[in-house]
Image (cartoon, rainbow, N blue to C red):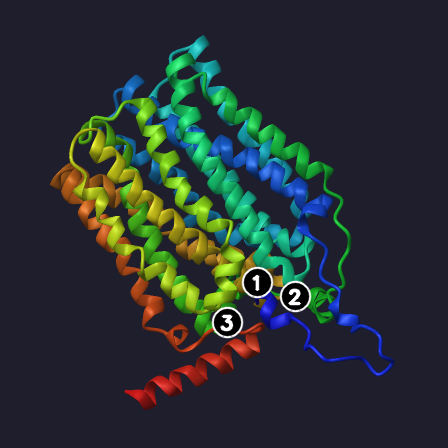
């Protein structure tokens, strides 16, 4: 999975005395036109999404006077499509042109987000319309994300996946660093509703960059021969094939359980955190954006060294260490007192989680992409998202209910401790006995089985 594992064996010399042929290193991703277009477009889309992440709850809270539970419903509706549409989206992504599907999703989200300020100016913006826009945008985001995760392996070589994923995650963290603060400033200058013109522009830029990508066909080997056979499978069987693949991968199952648990509690806290900052810590709209920007610093700093850290620690070891070690810093969020000092502490807690997410997601996503057959990439991505993202709307509802019934601070305690508990899935797993993740599904099964045997003997 890492360059250590695919690096050619060093020898003193070749038979003819020439330099070893395998010494040639892969072309830098900074010289790949297609990758740079993908990176640029997604950076723009992520920036717009980070701005709306602040603008949507602030619009509901300050302009539409929504309650804590009504605000949490926005998060619920944004993520509910993952539970309903992920599996069908996987079939669409494998059957249709993925790049065109992504472009269509970008243009659809551009129209939806751009309609909010127009409706506010021409008519009277109501909460039900905001719910509708958020829900429909969520459906398009599901389709986009399922296709998007299958794009990188088509544009880069296998030994560039970790580096490519790290750069994409760094672009997300850069957007998180700039976006919330920019969103807070825009809301202060032009108002919450007009800020959504920025989102519309960002999705348009993303669509243009995707259109400019010229994907070069890559040999699929045995996958091509199986593809024709797959089209004859019943729709129900084809829909569930991604889940069946994950069930056969012991390591992937543990990663999925960890991600799912973390997503549930993270989204529970996310659904109440803007309200928590406003009403418990006394933050202004500009300060709320600044807090989210502070949190991105942790991920951005770690992202620059993700490849190096993964090689040094090992691609298996880095997964459980990233989940377990930063946990105590999460406690700074519910411990934060009212006032400026409390806002700083909350931002530091978020920064610790951001650093965790970069290391964990890069290693886990690269492994999933590497062991998944190209012909099944969409369905496996969809199955993964259906489970680990499907719990997100439930987490959002739980956060809203906890905040309404117990109060914002007790609810935040439950969410933070639950997030840290997700580490137990990977700490107490075969990963703890491994340094690096295996390269393919067959190795994954045998390596995990060996690790389980060792654990049994030790016990």
Circle 3 crowding by C-alpha within 10 Å: few under 14, some 14–19, many from 20: many
In the rendered image, which quarter contains the C terminus?
Answer: bottom left
User: How far apart, in angstroms, are the residues tagged by discs 3 and 1?
Assistant: 28 Å
Regarding residue 198, the answer to whether it shows in the image is: yes
Q: Is residue 96 left or right of residue 426?
A: right
Q: Residue at x 19, y 43 (%)?
A: 334
User: How far apart, in angstroms, are the residues tagged by discs 2 and 1?
Assistant: 8 Å
Are the two marked residues, 2 and 1, in contact with CB atoms closer than 8 angstroms?
A: yes
Q: Furthest-top residue in view?
A: 122
Q: Which residue is the site of mark 1?
A: 238
Query: Tag 3's secondary structure?
Result: loop
Q: Residue at x 35, y 37 (%)?
A: 75
Indicate whether 14 appears above or below 59.
below
Q: Which is more foreground, mark 3 or mark 1?
A: 3
Count the labels in the image: 3
Which residue is nearer to you in this view: 299 or 242? 299
Which residue is nearer to you in this view: 200 or 429? 429
Image quadrant where residue 408 sits: top left
Q: Residue at x 33, y 90 (%)?
A: 457
Q: Which residue is the site of mark 2?
A: 230
Query: Tag 2's secondary structure?
Result: helix
Q: Which residue is the site of mark 3?
A: 437
User: How far apart, in angstroms, are the residues tagged by discs 3 and 2?
Assistant: 29 Å
Query: Tag 1's secondary structure?
Result: helix
Q: Residue at x 49, y 66 (%)?
A: 312
In the rendered image, which quarter contains the N terminus?
Answer: bottom right
């Amino acid at each position: 999975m890492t360059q250590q594992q695919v690096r050619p064996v060093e020898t003193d010399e070749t038979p003819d005395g020439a330099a070893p042929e395998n010494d040639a290193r892969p072309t830098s991703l900074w010289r790949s036109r297609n990758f740079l277009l993908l990176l640029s477009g997604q950076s723009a889309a992520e920036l717009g999404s980070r701005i709306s992440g602040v603008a949507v709850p602030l619009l509901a809270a300050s302009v539409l006077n929504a309650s804590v539970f009504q605000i949490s419903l926005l998060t619920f509706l944004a993520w509910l499509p993952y539970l309903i549409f992920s599996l069908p989206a996987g079939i669409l992504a494998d059957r249709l042109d993925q790049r065109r599907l992504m472009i269509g999703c970008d243009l659809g989200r551009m129209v939806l987000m751009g309609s909010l300020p127009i409706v506010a100016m021409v008519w009277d913006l109501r909460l039900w319309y905001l719910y509708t826009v958020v829900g429909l945008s969520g459906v398009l985001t599901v389709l986009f994300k399922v296709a998007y995760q299958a794009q990188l392996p088509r544009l880069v070589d296998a030994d560039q996946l970790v580096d490519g994923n790290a750069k994409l995650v760094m672009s997300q963290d850069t957007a998180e660093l700039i976006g919330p603060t920019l969103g807070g400033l825009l809301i202060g200058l032009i108002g919450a509703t007009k800020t959504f013109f920025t989102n519309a522009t960002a999705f348009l830029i993303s669509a243009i960059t995707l259109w400019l990508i010229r994907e070069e066909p890559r040999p699929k080997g045995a996958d091509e021969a199986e593809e024709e056979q797959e089209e004859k499978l019943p729709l129900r069987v084809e829909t569930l094939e991604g889940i069946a693949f994950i069930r056969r991968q012991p390591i992937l199952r543990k990663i999925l359980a960890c991600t799912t648990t973390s997503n549930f509690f993270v989204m529970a806290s996310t659904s109440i955190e803007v309200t928590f900052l406003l009403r418990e810590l006394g933050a202004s709209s500009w300060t709320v954006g600044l807090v989210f920007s502070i949190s991105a610093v942790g991920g951005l700093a770690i992202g620059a060294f993700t490849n190096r850290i993964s090689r040094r620690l090992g691609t298996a070891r880095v997964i459980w260490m990233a989940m377990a070690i930063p946990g105590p810093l999460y406690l700074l969020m519910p411990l934060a007192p009212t006032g400026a000092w409390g806002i700083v502490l909350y931002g530091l807690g978020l920064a610790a989680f951001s650093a965790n997410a970069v290391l964990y997601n890069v290693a886990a996503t690269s492994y999933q992409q590497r062991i998944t057959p190209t012909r099944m990439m969409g369905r496996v991505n969809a199955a993964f998202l259906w489970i680990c993202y499907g719990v997100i709307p439930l987490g959002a509802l739980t956060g809203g209910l906890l905040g309404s019934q117990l109060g914002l601070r007790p609810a935040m305690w439950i969410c933070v401790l639950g997030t840290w508990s997700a580490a137990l899935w990977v700490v107490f797993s075969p990963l703890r006995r491994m340094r690096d993740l295996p390269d393919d599904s067959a190795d994954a099964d045998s390596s995990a089985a060996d690790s389980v045997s060792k654990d049994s003997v030790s016990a």
